[in-house]
């Protein structure tokens, strides 16, 4: 499991005073991308490989409201990987350790030159497998 | 079914050149809120009723990329309503009629004075039921 | 002068209950882009011309808070145009006709193939001049 | 001068592949708010004082494009403070030390109970003065 922490930004909270539901999907993506960087598959690698990671399916369950002023933690682990898609289990956790949101995000591997889905790039396969829970 | 159309905004598209996956959730919310307004339950009514509509669960399936330059249509209908939550079926459709994203959003009715979920306000019940598919 | 109207979106309002100051810059951009489309210089034209419009300078003055529930109007006119940059005067106006924000945005013409600023594409010059106040 | 660093998020970059101009204003605000927290004036204090900090004027000059994959640094210092408004000088700097954007943001002190601008809360005055360049 990989995790990253960050303060809630003011514009991310809505008139209810809590983080807008769409922002959790963005925190999830942040965690996925920082994990990729951490394991050594950088954005430059993805440009060399002509690979982007479109989200194909997601679900998210909201349990507890996060607020401006808090530092949140987003976590990511892999639940399924079949070479053409990977499914990530993701959480956003507040400073008291409560799960604010819990989700599942399935991404594909899209070759931007070919304009179609392809298999996970070879040098990324091992890294994705290393994150399997 | 209610629907609303709007142009893609430049900042909503990402370096892949397509609308970021989180934006579809925002288009869904826009459609829900404009529907509410259209049927006569305005934001002022929700303030009088001390009611907000937190999202409790959502899922979204991405079928086709939307792009800057397009005018999109977001649709909303109700699939389930049990007085304490309502589930909306939502789509975002491109100018060629292709479904770009399809989702399900369940919301609760939260009383901001009591700080807890309550039943759907009386004057809103009939309107929600009118949207059931 | 060109203008466009749109409802405030829920996520655009912050915990003060008002539209976040960064959103007005996005409304300004929306008005500029819809104006471009209206005068017949579409996004496809800009792709053919390899032209993007980076903002180089902006200022914005906030006069009155806009709120969720309102339909706002964003306006755009050109105050200066010297072939390599164009300066737009922009306003966001609320339903009571009050100016919420007033700004000035200067953009350049960047050729994405050459990777450097260029003169305004010929077929756009006349259109920009037509918007001069 | 206070500074904070953070990775560019994918959704913050636009189809040009660079950070959207509106995001820099959000980075500026992040730096102001983290500075406030660091000097001990927390969001809870502002709630006790019924104080919010609306932006009244801003300007921003864009010098260099920031990109997804970079870790940026946002800086904040105070240039003017007259008890009813404070003006912050702000920069966003890329990993090579280049200034991507440079701006000036003037905020007021708004009492949310009174619904009008007030003087800077006593316990914040000294802190603001400590940030004067």
Image (cartoon, coloured by chain):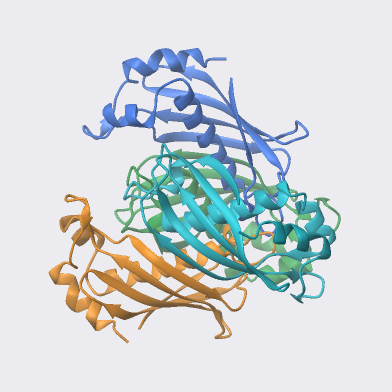
Chain colours: A cyan, B orange, C green, D blue
**Occupied quadrant, residue A129:** bottom right
* D78 is higher (above) or lower (below) than C91: above
Q: Could you tell me if residue C77 is visible in this image?
A: no
Q: Is residue C10 left or right of residue A8?
A: left
Seen at 23% across and 81% down, the residue is B129
**Occupied quadrant, residue B82:** bottom left
* B21 is higher (above) or lower (below) than C103: below
* B105 is higher (above) or lower (below) than D109: below
| Count of numbered tags | 0
Seen at 78% across and 63% down, the residue is C50
Q: Is residue B42 left or right of residue A106?
A: left
The answer to which of C95 and D40 lies nearer the viewer is D40
Pick out the residue farthest to the front. Answer: A133
Q: Could you tell me if residue B37 is visible in this image?
A: yes
* A60 is higher (above) or lower (below) than C63: below
The answer to which of A121 and D92 lies nearer the viewer is A121
Figure quadrant of the C terminus of chain D: top right
Seen at 35% across and 83% down, the residue is B1
> Residue D117 at what x, y percent from top left?
30, 29
The answer to which of B39 and B26 lies nearer the viewer is B26
Figure quadrant of the N terminus of chain D: top right
> Residue A60 at what x, y percent from top left?
46, 64
Q: Is residue C122 left or right of residue D133?
A: right
Seen at 46% across and 59% down, the residue is A102
> Residue B109 at what x, y percent from top left?
24, 63
Q: Is residue C51 left or right of residue B70?
A: right
> Residue A124 at what x, y percent from top left?
77, 60
């Amino acid at each position: 499991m990989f995790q990253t922490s960050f303060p809630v930004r003011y514009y991310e909270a809505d008139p209810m005073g809590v983080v807008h539901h769409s922002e959790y999907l963005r925190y999830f993506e942040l965690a996925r991308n920082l994990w990729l960087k951490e394991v050594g598959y950088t954005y430059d690698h993805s440009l060399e490989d002509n690979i982007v990671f479109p989200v194909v399916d997601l679900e998210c369950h909201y349990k507890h409201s996060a607020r401006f002023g808090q530092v949140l933690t987003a976590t990511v682990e892999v639940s399924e990987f079949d070479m053409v898609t990977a499914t990530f289990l993701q959480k956003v956790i507040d400073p008291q350790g409560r799960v604010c949101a819990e989700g599942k995000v399935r991404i594909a591997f899209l070759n931007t030159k070919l304009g179609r889905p392809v298999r996970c790039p070879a040098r990324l396969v091992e890294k994705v497998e290393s994150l399997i829970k």
